Amino acid sequence: KRGGATVSHTSRPSGAMPRPWGRLLFTGGEEGDATLRKVDLTEGEHIVGRRPECLVVYTDNRISSTHFKISLRNSSDLGKRAFDVCLEDCSANGTYLNAQLVGKGNFCFLFQRDEIGLLKPCGGDEQPPYAYVFHDLTGGCTADHFPFLATDATPQRAAKAVPPLSVSGLSSSGPTPLPTERTSASSSSNGTAKKRLGGIFGSRASSRCDTDEAATPPSEQHSLGAESVGEESLDLVSRQLAMLSDPSPTGMHTLNHTLQRGFKFQADAIALGGVTAFMDVIGATMAKPKKTAMDLQVLDIALDMLLTTSASEEGASSLLDEEGGFDKLVSVLSSPAQKTRSKALQLLACMVVYTDKPLVESSLRRANRYGGASPGVLLASLLRDKEGALPEAQTCTDVVTLLNALVACSGNPAALVDELSSAGVDDALTEIEPLFSSSPDLALQVDRYGAQKAKLAGVELAPPPPPPPPPGPP
């Protein structure tokens, strides 16, 4: 028996409604009219399942009587945030956080715009029948806004929490402490490379290699030229590296969120051989004939770490010294996930400007060694969707950004441009023109590529028309 969801509302005394701390937006494929419905979370704990007293009640027998619980608690790390939002999986039929199975008896943290899927994971080829997007509404709130927290001392849970940096994955004995986050911090950057990047990439200068130094107080910044902040940071980085080699689903989710808030100890990652570890993870993942959703997330996090680490001169030098590193990054361009392809392209573009040697160009040639060894064949294929539709604008932007870097830093740019044209790059750029109107960054990169080609051919481009004069007085 299958059926949609109904939302129950507990009767309350007359008066003001309690302030919601979160909201679930229905997005499942079998929700029917519920796809446009939302439900506010106002109690300390809410249950979704088939029981009549659940907040969201299902009649589908595939849904457990208590399928999952979602709760608000006082933070386990008050120095970082005021509240923890916890998702606890109570069903053997599958509760998924984004693309990952939480697992019955386990719980993990929820963050803004996380997706909760029932029976099937979110983000896969098949939409889950019942799913929600979580919205965090606790911003600017204190515990006084939520009276039910007065008796919450964040006790140990019967369920198992997976630490964000767990080395061994899911805990097998007893409860473990709730995971914590780190605040973001900036890394130093190579000034010379920044200037080259700015000249090549224009408005997307450094393609994520620049960092916002103003966003972090100087007292919190960790300079790569300074001493390590101590054994604690080394331990954190060591566990981060181990986590990628032995991942657990809920731990990977929390680690991913932690990295989004800032990968603070880049110097320690370099000292511990982190670049080699990241590249080993990428190589092992890409070598798998069939990649799971977990594999793709491990790949995504490893690329994020490399992007952050390579933003410094020391990190970039470590990547340049990594034997076979660029070949592994080029292999990621065949990944089925668009965001991993984009991150690999961004890394390759950054690395082009850190060396006078054509290392990235050589790797692109080796990827097509059985088809003429042209670096343009693979890049042109990324500008064409295999199904005949237009490709992703972000992927196209990153491809053309890499093309601009290769030409600008080439020892023989005229020959390279001719080779790229013969490989079909010019035709592919013409085919993606419909994307220009919705992607100014893509249009800018294509214009820059055209300007480089015209300069090499000795063609003087016409200046843009002057703006129209302002209207005269009536």
Image (cartoon, rainbow, N blue to C red):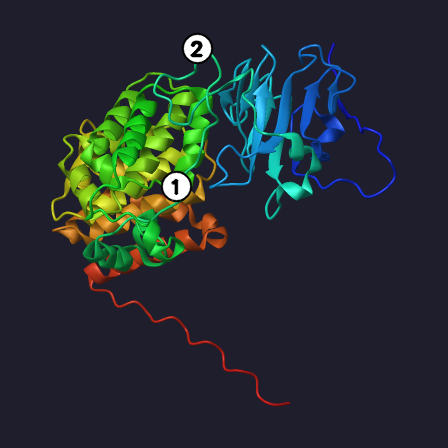
Whether residue 26 is visible to the viewer of this picture, yes or no, is no
Q: CA distance from mark 2 to mark 1?
A: 41 Å
Q: Is residue 8 left or right of residue 75?
A: right
Q: Which residue is mark 2?
A: 172
Residue density around tag 2, few if under 14, some if 14–19, many if 20 or more, within 10 Å? few
Q: Which residue is mark 1?
A: 395
Instruction: Name above or below for residue 426 compared with residue 103.
Output: below
For badge 2, the amino acid type reads Ser
Q: Residue at x 42, y 32 (%)?
A: 256
Q: Earlier in the sequence, mark 2 or mark 1?
A: 2
Up-down: is 153 above or below 349? above
**Within the image, what quadrant is residue 255 found in?**
top left
Residue visible at 26% across and 68% down in the picture: 460
Amino acid type, mark 1: Thr
Residue 245 in picture, x, y percent from top left:
31, 21
Front residue of 118/246: it is 246
Residue 42: image quadrant is top right
Quadrant of the drawing holding the N terminus:
top right
